[in-house]
Image: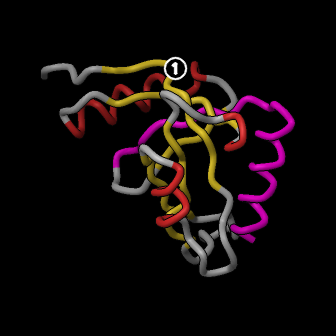
Amino acid sequence: MAFDYLEELQDEVTRGVGWYVCPGKAAGEWNLAKSPDELREACQLAANVYLFEQSIYKLKDVADSGGEDRYFVCKKILEPGPRGEPNLQWMIVDTKDAAELLRDVSQGPSPYFGATEVETFQPKGG
């Protein structure tokens, strides 16, 4: 189920469907959405929780990645959630080699994505 979800996400990204990601409040938790607007509040919250700059990234096909891009990797496929939804742990890495090495291979080599930074949030005092 989760592996199918990753393949569907990869297919959409390859076809040019816009997907954006930002870190969540817990380690390995990431938010995915079809526009950066949907993620701004979550990304600011993550910056405040971690007390460190956090970014929203646009996913892209690995074949189109390079230069300043990073890589969005599913590092672990977990048991499905209570409604059968995919439960995945993600991470951002700096190189394609790291993505190849760190991606989940429990059900075969899982797809990973190029990631271009589109917006950055600084922690706010409080």
Image-based side of 9 in relation to 43, left or right: right
Q: Mark 1: few, some, or many residues within 10 Å (few <14, many ≥20)?
A: few
Observer-nearest of 64 and 115: 64
Quadrant that contains the C terminus: top left
Which quarter of the picture shows residue 15? top right
Q: Name the spot of residue 106 as percent of width and height, x first.
A: 60, 81
Eyeballing the image, is 2 above or below 107?
A: above
Q: Residue furthest right?
A: 15
Image point 35% across, 25% down: which residue?
Answer: 44
In the rendered image, which residue does mark 1 sit on? 118
Mark 1 falls on what kind of element? strand
- Identity of the amino acid at label 1? Val
Q: Name the spot of residue 109 as percent of width and height, x first.
A: 66, 71
Q: How is the image coloured?
A: secondary structure
Q: Residue furthest bottom?
A: 106
Observer-nearest of 64 and 15: 64
Q: Is 104 one of the magenta-colored residues?
A: no
Image point 35% across, 46% down: which residue?
Answer: 25
Q: Name the spot of residue 73 as percent of width and height, x first.
A: 54, 54
Image point 34% across, 55% down: which residue?
Answer: 27
Image-based side of 53 in relation to 106, left or right: left
Which quarter of the picture shows residue 3? bottom right
Eyeballing the image, is 11 above or below 108?
A: above
Which portion, as a residue range, is magenta?
1-25
Eyeballing the image, is 124 above or below 16?
A: above
Image point 53% across, 44% down: which residue?
Answer: 71
Q: Residue furthest left?
A: 126
Observer-nearest of 22 and 59: 59
Q: Is 24 one of the magenta-colored residues?
A: yes
Which quarter of the picture shows residue 19? top right
